[in-house]
Image (cartoon, rainbow, N blue to C red):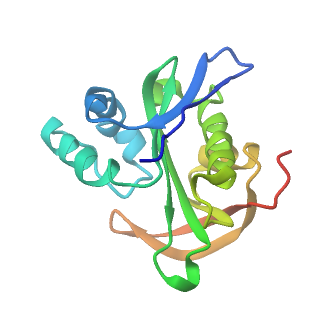
Amino acid sequence: MEEQKQQTAHTSGGAGAISLRPMQLSDVDDFMVWANDPDIARFCTWEPYTSRDDALAYIAGTILPHPYYRAICLDGRPVGSLSVTRNEAASDACRGELGYVLGSGYWGRGITTEAVKMAAAEVFGGARPELERVEAVVDVENEASQRVLEKAGFRREGVMRKYFVLKGRTRDAVMFSRLSTDDDS
């Protein structure tokens, strides 16, 4: 079995030590802090979790088997999560989609930006060698997430009108991408 490493970084904003590590079932209580928050779920495909058992089932059935699903940790404690999912179609297998959430009590500290930078370095550094492109599709109204991606070195490619349905409404989205060949700056 391949050993999964934990990356750690410190932010200049004094947020503490930020690290990425695989999620564990024992993270369920921390997971519930962000997963049951309606402010966080607003731009997510899921509704807020209200049941610890449902959260455990999701962690066991979806998160643990996922090849790149990480807890975003602050000083060792999960405060959010991040994943990079490879597209399934053979013609799209060089691309992966980035998704992330962070507990609202930690917003505005640069934690997600640093976590996204760390994930891109890890993915392109060998964790997902089949991927040449990581992309993020962001609701056009989610300006904070757009800033995260820009600060993390992703390029804004454009607005896709009426691109997806979220909670019963057709939404516009902004496409961001980062290539394995992009500069780290």
Q: Give the left or right position of residue 127, taking residue 21 as reference.
A: right
As drawn, 5 above or below 185: above
Q: Which residue is rendered at x = 70% and y = 22% of the image?
A: 11
As drawn, 164 above or below 55: below
Which of the 4 image quarters holds residue 116?
top right
Foreground residue among 166 and 89: 89
Q: Which residue is rendered at x = 34% and y = 49% of the image?
A: 63
Q: Which residue is rendered at x = 42% and y = 27% of the image?
A: 78
Outermost residue, bottom direction? 91
State the quadrant of the C terminus. Answer: top right
Q: Position of residue 81 (x, y in %)?
A: 45, 40
Which of the 4 image quarters holds residue 140?
bottom right
Which of the 4 image quarters holds residue 137?
bottom right
Foreground residue among 12 and 127: 127
Q: Position of residue 161 (x, y in %)?
A: 59, 76
Foreground residue among 87 and 35: 87
Q: Position of residue 3 (x, y in %)?
A: 48, 40
Q: Position of residue 60 (x, y in %)?
A: 24, 47
As drawn, 17 above or below 22: above
Q: Which residue is rendered at x = 55% and y = 69% of the image?
A: 172
Numbered circles on residues, count: 0
